[in-house]
Image (cartoon, rainbow, N blue to C red):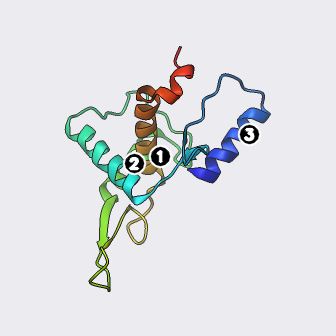
Amino acid sequence: MGWEAHRHENELKKKGLRNLCFIKEDEGRVGFKTTAENKDYMSLSFKDKIEKGSVQFHEKFLSISEFDNAKKMKDELVDQLYNYCKKVEPSRDPNKPPKISWGGKSGYGFDDNVMALMMILTMKREFFTSRKYNMYKK
């Protein structure tokens, strides 16, 4: 996501790391816009992967977060997936379309981990299918 991506890029470059590729899917800037349209695509794509059985936890799943073990992280991720949903708010103006949003926040809990997972899968696909990243694929 925009600002975080820019900050990460600067930190990694300061450390002298080379051979890096930063996804630039935010109108040419580092990062990825999480618009309702992108969330719709990511959510439906991820749902399709789950239904096909192509999403699994690795037996050596590791968590480096506030969760002190992988089991708790898996449980949190499953909980976030369960609460992540599409919200449709009708417009007060009958001439305007309803407001559509995706998320697990606003009374549904947090969604940071599931958003990160869906973004990683989406950007992995973009990286391997888009010509603009060919110079990094050797």
Residue at 39% x, 43% y is 74
Q: Looking at the image, is mark 1 or mark 2 earlier in the sequence? A: 2
Residue 29 location (% of width, % of height): 61, 45
> Which residue is disc 1 drawn over?
116
How packed mark 1 is, by other alpha carbons closer than 10 Å (few <14, some 14-19, many 20 or more), is few
Q: Looking at the image, is mark 3 or mark 1 earlier in the sequence? A: 3
**Marks 3 and 1, how far apart in space?**
19 Å
How packed mark 3 is, by other alpha carbons closer than 10 Å (few <14, some 14-19, many 20 or more), is few
69 and 62: which is toward the camera: 62
In the picture, residue 50 is in which quadrant? top left
Helix, strand or loop at label 3? It is: helix
Badge nearest the viewer, 2 or 3? 3
> Which residue is disc 2 drawn over?
77
Amino acid type at mark 3: Glu
**Marks 2 and 3, how far apart in space?**
27 Å
Residue 102 location (% of width, % of height): 36, 61
Farthest residue, direction front: 95
Badge nearest the viewer, 1 or 2? 1
**Marks 1 and 2, how far apart in space?**
10 Å
Check residue 11 in the rendering and tell me which mark sits there, or answer none. 3
Amino acid type at mark 1: Ala
Relative to 133, say whether 26 is above or below: below
Helix, strand or loop at label 1? It is: helix
